[in-house]
Image: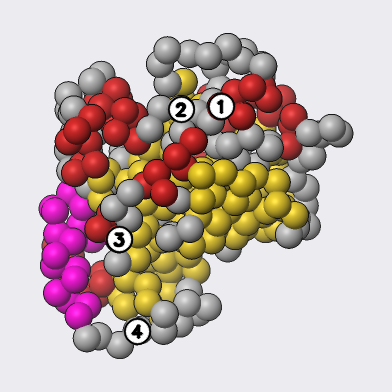
Amino acid sequence: MKLLTYSSGGEATYGVATDDGVIDVGKRLGESYGSLRAVLEADALDAVREVTAGQSPDSGLNDISYLPVIPNPEKIVCVGLNYEDHRIETGREPSGYPVLFARYAHCQVGHGQPMVRPNNSEQFDYEGELVVVIGKQARHVSREDALSHIAGYSIYNDGSVRDWQSHTHQFLPGKNFDATGAFGPWMVTSDQIPDPTALTLTTRLNGQVLQHAGTDQLIFNIPYLISYISSFMVLRPGDVIVTGTPGGVGMKRNPPLFMKAGDTVEVEISGIGTLVNPIVDE
């Protein structure tokens, strides 16, 4: 299934995307499952399958406003420097453990929504990334069992305000300006992606390919990340892990290439889809 959160007629809901449109799951399941996160918390994906089987779409894919797949995650854990070519282009030394930082829900937008370059920086960079959405609570999870805790996979553009990111060794400021991260267009359930290392990620800016890599190139793979993160905190249903970006980021190009108003950025991952966002100024 392709699960998404969206707005139709001014009302936020969630549903299943098909080739013909969107089936509104929120109105069919009612208040018992008030959000996609609530569905995951209740382990109710089978209920979604049952209630949408044989149903016709309620809206066209072009007639909705996409919201972040999980608009209200408890945690967004991002992984830095997790592709070797990106680590090399930044000049960072290899690390024995993942580089982790947090994003917060306020900085997310959905597919088709504008990503906003803040008015106090001209260094707004793209970072296409594979997303893991947690579906089952995880604490001290082994690598061998890690994939069973995944509800599905999605796409992130971890838009980075580079000068603010480099103020200190902590990435937090450059990663949490309002509307700088994009998440969508939907989550593909894990049964549809049995091997997350077999995907291809491509980032395009105004049609030009700037990043292209296989997810098998992750330095710390998804089972390792879930096992490592769950060793120091509980991962709960709806939590989001943004797994890292390949080489080719704008700040390391010669000359540097940053996103500006009027640009369009696309992140495509095979087996999932394409996340598209226009760029505007604050």
Would you name the residue on which mark 3 appears? 192
Distance, label 3 to label 2, CA atoms, is: 24 Å
* Magenta residues (range): 33-53
In the figure, is residue 67 to the left or right of 164?
left
Question: Which disc is residue 191 wearing?
Answer: none
Residue 145 occupies quadrant: top left
Three-letter amino acid code at disc 3?
Gln
Within-10-Å neighbours for mark 2: few <14, some 14–19, many 20+: some
Label annotation for residue 84: 1
- Going by the numbered disc 2, the residue's amino acid type is Ile
Q: Badge 2 is on which residue?
A: 219
The amino acid type, in three-letter code, at marker 1 is Glu
Give the mark nearer the N terminus: 1 vs 4. 4
Residue drawn at x 26%, y 72% is 25
Mark 4 vs mark 2, CA separation in Å: 40 Å
Q: Are marks 1 and 2 in contact (CB under 8 Å)?
A: yes
State the residue at coordinates (19%, 44%).
148
Marked residue nearer the N-terminal end (1 or 2): 1
* Residue at x-position 36% and y-position 51%: 153
Main SS of residues in magenta: helix
What residue is pinned by disc 4?
57
